[in-house]
Every structure is written in structure tokens, then in C-alpha cells.
């Protein structure tokens, strides 16, 4: 049985690399690494070579997501599982694996058409302490929980759920949200480790592949500091500070330089072993800046 263990890395296509460099460092506190290639920057959140690559190729959307498997045996077993399920994939060449700083790489697409990669063996720079882009009280919460979570575009939620189940994630609908138009939004959340969800979908049609990336600080004060910076820079906030019912993280959502959202968080609980659903959040998460695909009433 081969299952993915974490959302390990993301590639983002961006048009304004300079704006992203400033946002990642000064707003989020990530370490920006420029290796002089000219067409990309790396964002570090821990000891990995990178968790995020910013590719300056202009589409301002998700470029790819990387899901980790434990090692070479799991990597081979995953290929057998995908083949048996009739899911097409290509095995990354040595050059492609080196580009991602991994030992082994598969490339495929999820049912929504989102470029998806499965890898093992990330380059971990244990010799290079994490150095935040601005002073931080603590760290980014990664480790066995991976980068964070994403909400993705999926036209067919059932197909998406079956695909991510095959990869080894579990989950279900976790909210029934009554919309002003009388419809009920039923977002679907899936996990593969203690992080309450690593991927979610089912919030309706989306312009981009990705609605948001959530990442988490270990210290509440870092979330507060980020919030102060966002307010001082007058960056659009789509959802105000609030606490989700499912992961119970304190979060807010603000625009990134590509015009989609980063959800800054702290204090999430771990995934419970049995499914639950909710009809609203615990507090906050008021809707503020509209037009970011998060105009859903969570309260
Ligand atoms: C989340 O992380 C989220 O983005 C939404 C919309 C609801 C619950 C948890
Ligand atoms: Fe989220």
C-alpha cells in the first residue's frame, strides 16, 4: 500500500517576481532564496531546500503541487497503483527530478486538470538554518504536516474525491453553508497526516486552479505580526480573522501579488479520526474584500 504522506511543495506561476519577493519575506516571513537562474525564486519555510518555487512565467496561478511518498518502494508501488487505476502519468527524467530537488518524480493531473506531482526524497539542507525574511517569534508549522493546505478548482467533486482517495487521502463534506441565493455549498476536505486538511474543493466554479494556500505559524504572535503588516500595507483582506469549525485554526485570508489568497493561520487542531460536519465557523471570518472566490458566509 502506497499512500502520500504530505503536501510537500508547490510551484506557483507569477508575473511580478519583485512583488512576490517582498510579499513572501516582509509579509509572510518566508526565506527567499535566489540561486541566480533569473526565472525563479525559492521560498523556504524550514530546512527543506524550498517549499515553494515562484516561476516568473506570468499566469498568476498554481503551476503544480507535489505530494510526498516515503521512499523508493512506495514510489514504485504508487506507479503500479496509478497504472492499475488507468490514471496516466509520466516518470520525471533525472533532470526533472533534479530541478525539483527530489530523488524521484511522477507527473500527472488531478481530475480538475491541476498539475500534480508525486515525489520521494526531497533535498533537506540540514546545514543551513532557516532564516526568516523578517523577524519571527517562532517557525512555520511544517514537519510531518507538510506545507499547508490548498483549495482547488474541481468541476467534478466526486471524481476529485476518488482521485485523492487513490493517492491515500481521506475526508468528506465538512460544511453545509447556506448561501444567500438559496443554494447550499458543501465543501469537501481531505487529509493524509495530522494536518486537518491538505486539500479541499467544492466551493463552486473558480477562475483560477487555486483559491488559497494556507500555512501555519507555530506562534500566535507571528500571525498577529503578519496581520499588522497586511493592515499597514493595506493589502486586501477577503476573510477577516476568525476560527474555522473544522481545523479550529485562527486564520485570515489576504490577497497575494498574483490576485489569489494566502490564508495565514495558527493553532489548528489535528484531524479527528471520525468525520463531522458544521454549518458555520466558531467566530469571525467576516467577508471583507470581495471578488476572491471567498464570498461565502462562514458565520
Ligand atoms: C478552511 O481552511 C477553509 O479555507 C474554509 C473555507 C473552511 C474551513 C477551513
Ligand atoms: Fe483554508
Image (tube, grey):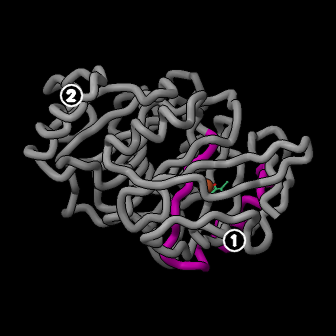
Secondary structure category for the residue under label 1: strand
Confirm if mark 2 falls within 8 A of ligand 2: no
Which residue occupies the foreground of this view, 173 or 94? 173
Quadrant for residue 38, please give it. Answer: top left
Q: Quadrant of the C terminus?
A: bottom right
Q: CA distance from mark 1 to mark 2?
A: 41 Å
Q: Which residues are magenta?
A: 211-239
Q: Is residue 226 magenta?
A: yes
Residue shown at 65%/72% (left/top)? Answer: 250
Q: Which quarter holds ligand 1?
A: bottom right
Determine which residue is flagged by label 1.
243
Q: Is residue 72 magenta?
A: no
Answer with left or right where residue 277 lies relative to residue 3: right
Quadrant for residue 52, please give it. Answer: top left
49 versus 208 height, above or below: below
The image position of residue 289, as x and y in percent, is 85, 48
Which residue occupies the foreground of this view, 276 or 7? 276
Residue shown at 21%/28% (left/top)? Answer: 84
159 versus 187 height, above or below: above
Determine which residue is flagged by label 2.
84
| Residue 41 seen in this snapshot | no
Q: CB atoms at circles 1 and 2 under 8 Å apart?
A: no
Amino acid at each position: 500500500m502506497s499512500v502520500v504522506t504530505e503536501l510537500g511543495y508547490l510551484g506557483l506561476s507569477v508575473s511580478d517576481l519583485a512583488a512576490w519577493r517582498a510579499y513572501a519575506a516582509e509579509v509572510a516571513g518566508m526565506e527567499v532564496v535566489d540561486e541566480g537562474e533569473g526565472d525563479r525564486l525559492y521560498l523556504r519555510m524550514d530546512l527543506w531546500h524550498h517549499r515553494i518555487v515562484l516561476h516568473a512565467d506570468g499566469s498568476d496561478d498554481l503551476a503544480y503541487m507535489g505530494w510526498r511518498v516515503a521512499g523508493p518502494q512506495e514510489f514504485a508501488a504508487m506507479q503500479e497503483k496509478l497504472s492499475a487505476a488507468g490514471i496516466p502519468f509520466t516518470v520525471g527524467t533525472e533532470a526533472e527530478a533534479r530541478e525539483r530537488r527530489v530523488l524521484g518524480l511522477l507527473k500527472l493531473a488531478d481530475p480538475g486538470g491541476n498539475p500534480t506531482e508525486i515525489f520521494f526524497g526531497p533535498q533537506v539542507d540540514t546545514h543551513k538554518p532557516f532564516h526568516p525574511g523578517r523577524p519571527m517569534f517562532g517557525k512555520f508549522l511544517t514537519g510531518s504536516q507538510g506545507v499547508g493546505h490548498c483549495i482547488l478548482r474541481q468541476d467534478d467533486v466526486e471524481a476529485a474525491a476518488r482521485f485523492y482517495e487513490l493517492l491515500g487521502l481521506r475526508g468528506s463534506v465538512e460544511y453545509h453553508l447556506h448561501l444567500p441565493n438559496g443554494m447550499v455549498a458543501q465543501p469537501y476536505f481531505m487529509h493524509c497526516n495530522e494536518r486537518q486538511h491538505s486539500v479541499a474543493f467544492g466551493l463552486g466554479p473558480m477562475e483560477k486552479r487555486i483559491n488559497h494556500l494556507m500555512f501555519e505559524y507555530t506562534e500566535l504572535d507571528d500571525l498577529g505580526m503578519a496581520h499588522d503588516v497586511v493592515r499597514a500595507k493595506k493589502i486586501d483582506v477577503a476573510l477577516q480573522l476568525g476560527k474555522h469549525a473544522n481545523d479550529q485554526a485562527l486564520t485570515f485570508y489576504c490577497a497575494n501579488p498574483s490576485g489569489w489568497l494566502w490564508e495565514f493561520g495558527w493553532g489548528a487542531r489535528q484531524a479527528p479520526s471520525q468525520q463531522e460536519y458544521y454549518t458555520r465557523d466558531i467566530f469571525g471570518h467576516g467577508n471583507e474584500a470581495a471578488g476572491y472566490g471567498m464570498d461565502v458566509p462562514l458565520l
